[in-house]
Structures are given as structure tokens and as C-alpha cells.
Amino acid sequence: MSGNWVVGITGASGAIYGVRLCQVMLDQGLSVHLIVTDAGWRVLHDELDWNVSKRQDMLQEHFGGRTGSFNYHPIADIGATVASGSFRTKGMVVIPCSMGTLSGIAHGSSDNLLERTADVMLKEGRKLILVPRETPLHAIHLENMLNLSRMGVRMLPAMPAFYNRPRSIDEMVDFLVGKVLDSMDIEHSLYRRWGDNNEQPRP
């Protein structure tokens, strides 16, 4: 499971998914390279009460002191290591992924470090997993997702499941993050799988 992974957090609702994914990966000793868009920082403030005027303090509070290696790259740092195909990574997850960012990736605009890094994943043939969080979806959203899917990008919408009878928001978050980790081929125990111990989900 060793190697570098890039995680992007954008301005779509659901910043908690990206935060939780980074924490789980770091607790497993993985190397995380985080990119947050300007709108992503706004959502971290609005949904999770992060003090975004003290970004480094917030990053240290939520991601510091864990087993893995944590690296933060400002969105405007187009010269960051992750912007180059020569920097080896296992892949990238954009969680949550706004429709604006998805469109930028689909059209190869590379207007910021997150979009450029996603473009690197595509050109180098590495894993790229997008977690769109929007509803309802119109035709342009769907066409962009279809085009990326045809290029091998994994689309994993932020849709909760209820067959495992979640009892809290944390359990719903862990289910979605667990599905992302499955797509990354990373072992975890965030949720009980259907059929585990020959039992159905708890009543």
C-alpha cells in the first residue's frame, strides 16, 4: 500500500468526505498530498467550522501527528511536485468533486494545480477517482462524466447506502470513504460488507 496519493477537496458540499479519507490514509501510514481549491476552503469553513484564516493550524490539527506523511500544496502552486508526471504517485482522488472542477478536468483546462494534477493522472495512465456531489444533474454534467468515464476515470458519486443501517452521520461518511478506498485497492474496515460472517446487515 506504499506510495504517494493525491487528494483534492473542492467547493462541492461534503468536505467531510475528503477530510475523513485523508485521516484514514494517514493512519494507515500512506503518503498524502492534499490540494484544496479556494471554494473548498470556504466549504471547510461553512460545513466543518474550520478557521480558514489559519490554514496551516487547521491542517496540523486535523492531519498532523499521524503515522503517514502529509503534504499540502497550495492551489496556485503550479510548480508543485504533483504537477509533474515524473513525480511518481499511485493516483488521485477528488473528494468531493464540484461540477466546475469536473468540467475543467474533462476539458483539460489545467487552470490550477488540482486540474493540472488530474491531467497528469490521465496522461500517465494512473488511477483517477472523482466523487461528484451535485443534484440534480443536467446534460452537460452527465456528458462530462461520461467522457471521463470512457477515459478510464472512476466515477464514484457521493451517494449514501442504507442496507447497512447507518446510525450516525459518521457511519454514512465511513461507508462512502470505504467505497473510495475499495477503488484505490486499499484495505480498510470502515463498514461491514454484505455477507460478512454470513450475516445480513443488522436489523
Image: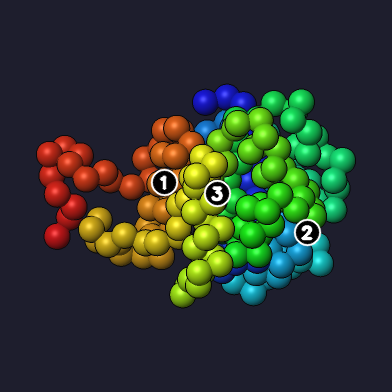
> Mark 3 vs mark 1: which is more N-terminal?
3
Compared with 99, 93 (above or below) is above
Q: Is residue 158 visible?
A: yes
> Mark 2 vs mark 1: which is more N-terminal?
2
Q: Is residue 159 left or right of residue 143?
A: left
Q: Is residue 187 left or right of residue 192?
A: right
Q: Is residue 7 left or right of residue 152?
A: right
Compared with 36, 2 (above or below) is above
Q: In the image, residue 127 lies at what x, y percent?
A: 56, 36
Secondary structure of the residue carrying tag 1 is helix
Q: Is residue 132 left or right of residue 170?
A: right
Kind of residue at badge 3: Leu
The label shown at residue 178 is 1
Q: In the image, residue 111 lies at what x, y percent?
A: 79, 55
Residue in the image at 41% along x and 39% along y: 182
Residue in the image at 74% along x and 30% along y: 85
Compared with 30, 76 (above or below) is below
Discs 2/1, front? 1
Q: Which residue is mark 3?
A: 148
Using the numbered discs, state the Cα–Cα distance from disc 2 to disc 1 in whole angstroms. Answer: 27 Å
Kind of residue at badge 2: Arg
Kind of residue at badge 1: Gly
> How busy is the neighbourhood of tag 3: few (under 14 within 10 Å), some, or many (20 plus)?
many
Where does the C terminus fall, quadrant-wise? bottom left
Image-quadrant location for residue 50: bottom right
